[in-house]
Amino acid sequence: MPKTLFPNADPETRARLEQDPTVKLFNSHDWSSSSLGPIPGWSESLKGAVRTMIVASTPMVMLVGEEGNLLYNDAYARFAGNRHPHIFGMPALEAWPEIADFNRQNIARGLNGESWDFRNQELVLNRHGQMESGWMDLHYSPIVGDDGRSMGTLCIVHEITDRVLTEQALARSEERLSLALNGTTLVGTWDWNVTENIVTSDDRFAAMYNLDPLQAGLGVPIEQFLSAIHPDDLARVQQQIETALADGSALNSEYRLVARDGAVRWVMASGRPRMDGEGRAVRFPGVVVDITEQRVIAEALAKSELQFRTLADTMPQMVWSTLPDGYHDYYNARWYEFTGVPAGSTDGAGWNNMFHPDDQERAWAAWRLSLETGEPYQIEYRLRHHSGQYRWTLGRALPIRDAEGQIVRWIGTCTDIHETRLAAEERELVAQELSHRIKNIFAVLTGIIGLSARNRPEAKDFADQLRKRIYALGEAHDFVRPHSHFSAPQSGQGLISAFLARLMRPYNDVSGEVDRVRFLGEDFAIDDAAATPLALLFHELATNAAKYGALSRPEGRVEVTGESRGDQYQIVWREIGGPEVVEPGELAGFGTRLVGMSVEGQMRGTLSRAWNAGGLEVTILVPKDALARSSRLQSVATH
């Protein structure tokens, strides 16, 4: 007897039926090893039920006999996933061990002849290589045999997992929306039944539109809501609503609401109508957000921006600003008047093209350093004028920081200093010429003294001392003469240490590698008024040291120490490694008087000498305002 569910079918019909893979599986399965036995031994009731099941498009499965052997159709095979075809014909408890208890009860109820349903039944199954939840609607019916007794149960499976997951996601979304709305008094929701002209809303929306929350919850005509809109905005809002209703477009409108106490608040309403099949609006849900605070801030910001632009445009300087990363996004009117470029053409990095080619890299380097360190930006460069020539400009910028110290913007200016720069260059030329002539006068004086000394041998020593003093004055003049930024001395110039090093060059060794006169301690800046008496002082001390003191011996040296003492500055001249000195009986020479006039007369200081065993030590104490004009001016301003 053939092992087929359709033994009387002709070959053509059988071939068509066996295109169903599950039908083919029924025919090829070894039923002799199961409790059901071969298909020909099945009852006609069972075979009839199976034939009905396998041609159905809905997933169906039979749990037959005491073991609940699984017989199912192709739709259920797809439901079983990776478990098919292994579980075909197996006892249900072995086929689905993860739900064995669930199936055990179903087998018993089916054999007992019961019918029952499970709605939204969650089952955790391993259908695709891992355990996962699935939701089904399950309908169980008994399979009744020829004797009227149940042979098992037929289960119709409607998987609703996608629907359940969608509903859960929607519920979570609605919950989050509800929490968000309940957490603020600034957002309200409405739903307008356009067909019946009934608007229902939540409590927040009703409060904004001066309505009783209970009435608004039950629904009121839209005209009651529109009555709260500011009269100057009402016509515009009505037109926007009509446009949205006509074409189904979104509504996004900002307008004012007038409260019962007369207070005015700004809101933003957003929504989109729902259209029927004929293109008519039937529902119009949406939300409204109170934006009064944002409007106030925006208006204040706009006012501040207007004031800034007005102020910036009235300034004689070119004003610009950048983002924290240095992106230029604003220039005032003076910039465009000076450069003549179209508005916006120098935004971003376009500003660099306005510099003279020789200044571009230097300007970029200074700007990058300021962006990296936050230090103020200051540089002089040549900027292209609208006439086509390059003019010297002073560029400055300062960072604007927030409460946490983070840079939020850079504000900068460009000042035209072209005429000032040219005038400074002219003054520099005059100063250099004047300095050159003064040095020539010193040279002429030195020459006259030398010629005069030739005819008066007895005056040679005096002449030598006089020439050296004039040399010291010349060095002092050259050191502190006025400088522009073009001829500004290198770092260290203008300080006592550098001044002393220049004056003492003749007393160092021939190689220049050893400084026999060294400066130690705290340095101080001096000007031309203090340079002359200091030059004569240091020259006289060095001359005496070369004749009688430490500098008269190769190993001898001098240490000059500076120290700030309140509003006074102390200089100590200490000779080391020279011959033993003793205090002379009387100090009445010209050199002594010259030192006294320099310190006590011109600098208003005091001078004391100590003849120590190691060498002479001279201590000079002078007011700081006698050493530099800036100190004197500061002192006058203070008093």
Image: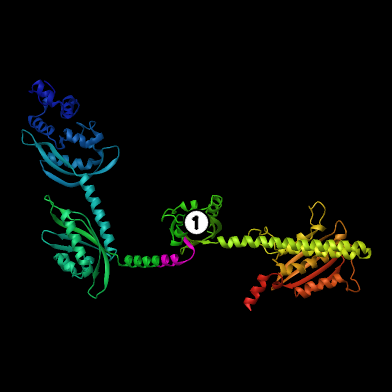
What colouring does the structure picture have?
rainbow
Q: Residue furthest front?
A: 387
Front residue of 403 and 325: 325
**Kind of residue sitting beneath label 1:** His
x, y percentage for residue 564?
Answer: 71, 69
x, y percentage for residue 241?
Answer: 18, 60
Residue holding disc 1: 385
Kindly tell me whether residue 533 is visible in this rendering: yes
x, y percentage for residue 405?
Answer: 48, 62
Kindly tell me whether residue 580 is visible in this rendering: no
What are the residue bounds of the magenta stretch? 307-321
x, y percentage for residue 470?
Answer: 81, 64
Q: Residue furthest bottom?
A: 639
Residue at horizontal 73%, vertical 60%? 436
In magenta stretch: residue 598:
no
Task: Mark 1: give few (<14), some (14-19) or many (20+) Cα within 10 Å.
Answer: some
Q: Is residue 230 left or right of residue 416?
A: left
Number of dots carrying numbers: 1
Q: Is residue 163 left or right of residue 583?
A: left
Front residue of 122 and 226: 226
The quadrant the N terminus occupies is top left
Residue at horizontal 11%, vertical 50%? 278
Q: Residue 639's quadrant in the figure? A: bottom right
In magenta stretch: residue 315:
yes
Q: Is residue 66 above or below residue 528?
A: above
Q: Residue 508's quadrant in the figure? A: bottom right
Q: Secondary structure at mark 1?
A: loop
